[in-house]
Image (cartoon, rainbow, N blue to C red):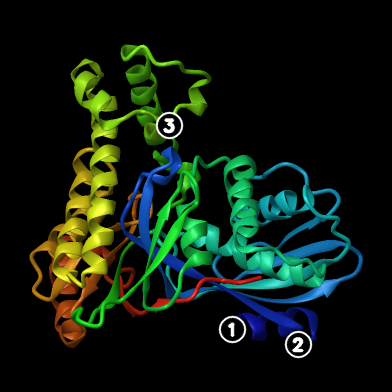
Amino acid sequence: MRCEDRLFEIYGKSPEGVTFSPYRICPIGAHSDHNLGKITGFAIDQGIHIAYRPKQNGVVEMTSLQFPKRAQWHIKEIGSKTGDWADYLRGATWALAKKYNLNVGLCGVIEGSLPIGGLSSSAAVILAFLDALCKVNRIHLEPFELIGIAFDAEKNYVGVNVGTLDQSCEVLSKKDHLLYLDCRDNQYELIPTNPNMKPYKIAIFFSGLEHSLAGSKYNMRVDELRSGVYALQAFAGMDYGKFNEANARDVDFEIYQAYKDRLPTTWARRCEHWYTEFKRVEAGAEAWRQGNLEEYGRLSFESGWSSIHNWESGAPEQIKLYEIMRETDGIYGGRFSGAGFKGCCMALIEPDKAEKIAEEVERKYLTAYPEMRGKYSFHLCDSADGVRI
């Protein structure tokens, strides 16, 4: 891998270890986890590698093959975020150091195997880095402890109002299984691929537009949903506390139905997405259990439609990709991948039609956006196991 070669070029020594965290997709369950909803998802066989060596002086020195400038800090003096790509790694150091005594730093090189945007590369970077930092400090983390530390880093250090969808998919997933997770209590099920299910591959259509959740409208959308929930609690005479503690999961669908017409239009749309997505996840998990890939795909397309019209996410290029996917033969279903602000789309497709699908989607997309030639890309993936520390 290039990260190993680059580490040797910089330090004149081979890595002592290489960690890997997979990317993830969420065909149904988007924009739900931050309000304690349910999700379905997979880890995929592409992701983040970090080649590393320990540094006994406690210094962390990281280089990325995707971003310029080397980042450096000490495990005892992390400091505040600086707004660069390494904030996710500083946040991981900060979150781990709150629970464990860190003595050993590391030097490392990060390599991503797919373009950035929509596959939760931020969570994958955090998890791969935590793996390396734990190994050099001889720390073992159980799965939900790892998820919690990665979540703490991204939400409370970097400042993105995420839920635990990304981290959970990248840790708990199992190859050839659908992860069905309740974000309220972390109860989950790994639903095996039904032996009667039609074959499928995971297709990634990268729009050519990179994104950052911290710089997108992601946080605003979460606040708009929470505003709607807060108002519903007031209308219904429910007890409520601090604004940031309001969660859609604590307000029954029947209450939403009774008072939704009193909400401002924007808040109502955010709530409409959350409540209908909750129902789609439950229906999708059952469809997968029954081996009904067509129904699961239909629900994923429906999830994408709601993300455009109710959650109001998606750059024009991404919306165009979604529309092309819907009219392409051999695609069971798909949607934006990630928050839906630039990035990529994902789809479950018929394997024997992969080449034709790739050609058709590329032709139509580049006809609409010729300036994306050389930036747009297609990738064929499989499900994978999650990271383990």
Earlier in the chain: of badge 3 and badge 2, it is: 2
Q: Which residue is mark 3?
A: 247
**At x 60% / y 63%, what residue is drawn?**
143
The image position of residue 44, as x and y in percent, is: 42, 73
Ranked by sequence position, the earlier of labels 1 and 3 is: 1
Left or right for 204, reference 179? left
Decide: marks 1, 3 in contact (CB < 8 A)? Answer: no
Residue under label 1: 2
Q: Nearer the viewer, residue 50 or 252?
A: 252
> What residue sits right under mark 2 in the picture?
14
Q: Amino acid at mark 3?
A: Asn
Residue 311 visible, this orientation: no
Q: Callout 3: helix, strand or loop? A: loop
Which quadrant of the figure contains the N terminus? bottom right
Label 1: few (<14), some (14–19) or many (≥20) C-alpha neighbours in 10 Å: some
| Circle 2: residue type | Ser
What secondary structure is found at the residue carrying circle 1? helix
